[in-house]
Amino acid sequence: MDIRYHKWLELEVTHTYFIHNICSVLKLVPTSETAQIFNNYQILLKRHKNTVSFYVGLTEGVSLDVLTQFEGISNLYFQVLQEDNFFFSYTDIEFSNEEELLFFSNLNKDAGATQLQGSQFTNETDLVSKKPEVFNVSLKSDDTLLEVKTLDGTVIISEDVSNVENPNYVINLGSQESGVYQLWLNGELMDGFFMTSERMELNAIGVIQLQMESLKNNYEDGLTYHMDFNARAVHRQYKVVLPTERKIEVNTIEILGMEDEKYDGPIKEKLIGEQMAEVFTSDIPLQLKIELDKHPQLNVIYTSEFSNRTNELEIKLPNPSLERIAKNTNEENEISFFSSTIIYV
């Protein structure tokens, strides 16, 4: 009996940091439960650049009918692994703690929607906490009703906690499958979390849920889901060093922006030892890019004791290093980012 593999789904990952938005630094790994489903249903994955294609094995002459082909499958889950340690340096997402994961899902989407994140780009609203099968919830004295629900609203735990003596209430989800759940207290949503007994990879940054009923209801040939990321915007800071041994006298020094930005400064700053730098900072944050279309330009007009002639120096400034991005929080608790680059003239 001949088996032919038919492509039935694609998942595309985009990121504005990369050329043509092609993001190939994220990898999908099926959870153990999903891997077993893949084996039972003859489903294969093939990765090419920023696209993962899903194939299913069909008997020769049999056409794909998603309504019946995947009967018995409720959810498919995947760990999202990053293969670039600087991913969150250039990605516009802020984690609150190490126990958070990005959660992507096709559930509860409008008909025709193919993005797996909640907004145009993945952001903090897509974060959920990570919990084991058994965990504690801290109750307050006025808490009365504790509920745990699935994303479709199904209540799997409902407990009257008004007379509970121990404020550390134990929740056991050992009988449930891995997935995202919601914790409700007194009718109010308190937390969304991903529960699994499976070990998460060290470089796992998120989880994807493909809810098969939703997929079937919205299926059409060539269906492609999307995960979309936006590049972080940072203030560019250039620290220009004019070595004293050059014995030059600067008449004017300025940086011309590559877009609409202007560079404030220079402000003198002492670096290591007695070395001084002229510091320029962009007045607006600029999105990071793996390659710049245009570069800021440093212009210096100077004279030297070795010559009475006025000299002019033009230097195309480099793309900021991802290793030198720092976060700043002001008194109003507003967060901004700065990239610092030292330029030796």
Image (cartoon, rainbow, N blue to C red):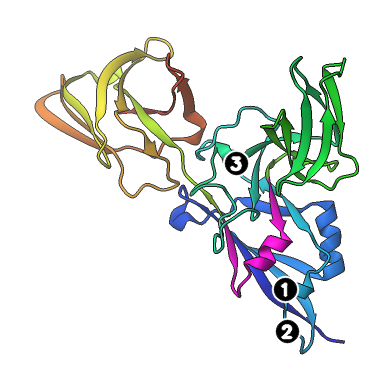
Q: CA distance from mark 1 to mark 2?
A: 10 Å
Dot 1 amino acid type: Val
**Numbered badge on residue 66:** 1
Badge 1 element:
helix
Q: Identify whether 242 is placed above or below 11.
A: above
Quarter of the rendering containing residue 19: bottom left
Q: Residues within 10 Å of mark 2 (few under 14, many from 20)?
A: few
Residue at mark 2 to residue at mark 3: CA–CA distance: 36 Å
How far is mark 3 from mark 1, CA to CA?
A: 28 Å
- Where residue 20 appears, x then y in whole percent? 44, 58
Q: Is residue 135 visible?
A: no
Could you tell me if the residues under marks 1 and 2 are in contact, i.e. CB atoms within 8 Å?
A: no
What's the amino acid at mark 3? Asp
* Residue occupying the point 73% across, 62% down: 212
Q: Residue at x 84, y 23 (%)?
A: 169
Vertical arrangement, residue 334 with respect to residue 149, above or below: above
Q: Is residue 225 magenta?
A: yes
Label 1 Cα neighbours within 10 Å, binned few <14 / some 14-19 / many ≥20: some
Q: Nearer the viewer, residue 81 or 131?
A: 131
Q: Which residue is mark 3?
A: 126
Task: Indicate the quadrant containing the N terminus: top left, top right, bottom left or bottom right.
Answer: bottom right
Q: Disc 2 residue type?
A: Ser
Q: Residue extending furthest top?
A: 274
Q: Position of residue 88 (x, y in %)?
A: 56, 37
* First of labels 3, 1 by sequence position: 1
Q: Secondary structure at mark 3?
A: helix
In this orientation, does residue 143 appear? yes
The residue that label 2 is drawn on is 63
Up-down: is 17 above or below 41? above
The residue range painted magenta reads 207-226
Q: Earlier in the sequence, mark 2 or mark 3?
A: 2
Query: Does residue 120 appear to the left or right of 97 in the view shown?
Result: left
